[in-house]
Image (cartoon, rainbow, N blue to C red):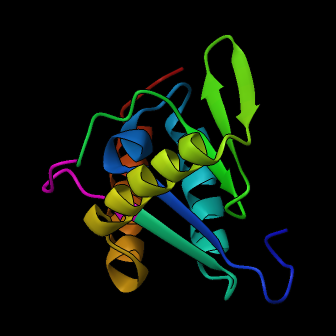
Amino acid sequence: MLYEPGRESVFVLTEAVLRTWPSTPALMLAQLDRLLAVESLSTVRLGVIPWRRPVPLLPRHGFTLCDEQAVVIEAFTGERVSVDSAEVAAYEETFDRFQEAAVFGDEARELLLRVMKEFRELGDTVTP
């Protein structure tokens, strides 16, 4: 779907997500590199909410909006799909608020590169 002409995919992450590392600095560098590659696609907009900006609300779980028709709501125990128009509209409003707080384009790339630099430095000091 990321490469499909005429389709736009928009992703918004918090900087905290970029800095939470469940494994080694090397793995995080690989993940961040992949985000940079995806961000460069003309069909993708990648936004990051920097630490210096308040989040509009506490992100309690992830979710994916699907063409204004459905929302996939993710939790630790699984996920559920809702096609309820009121629930989809509520998640669209929430996503809009996160988008407004995020930086995109050059600012997002600079932030990703800065975090990558910090993980490279950590890689020199952390042993698995």
What stretch of residues is rendered in magenta?
A: 48-55
Image height of 92 relative to 111, above or below: above
Image height of 108 relative to 34, above or below: below
**How far across and down, in percent of the image, does residue 109 sit?**
42, 75
Q: Is residue 50 magenta?
A: yes
Between 128 and 84, the one lying in front of the other is 84
Overall secondary structure of the magenta section: loop
Q: Which residue is drawn at the image coordinates 70% and 83% (left, top)?
A: 43
Q: Which residue is drawn at the image coordinates 67% and 40% (left, top)?
A: 84
Q: Which residue is drawn at the image coordinates 32% and 71% (left, top)?
A: 103
**Quadrant containing the C terminus in the rendered view:** top right
- Residue 2 appears in the picture as rendered: yes
The residue most toward the top is: 77
User: Does 11 sit left or right of 115 as displayed?
Assistant: right
User: Does 78 sit left or right of 126 as displayed?
Assistant: right
Image height of 30 relative to 73, above or below: below
Q: How many marks?
A: 0
**Quadrant containing the N terminus in the rendered view:** bottom right
Image quadrant in which you'd find residue 113: bottom left
Q: Which residue is drawn at the image coordinates 56% and 40% (left, top)?
A: 87
Between 62 and 33, the one lying in front of the other is 62
- Residue 124 appears in the picture as rendered: no
User: Does 20 sit left or right of 52 as displayed?
Assistant: right
**How far across and down, in percent of the image, does residue 34 sit?**
66, 61
Q: Is residue 102 magenta?
A: no
User: Does 58 sit left or right of 86 as displayed?
Assistant: left
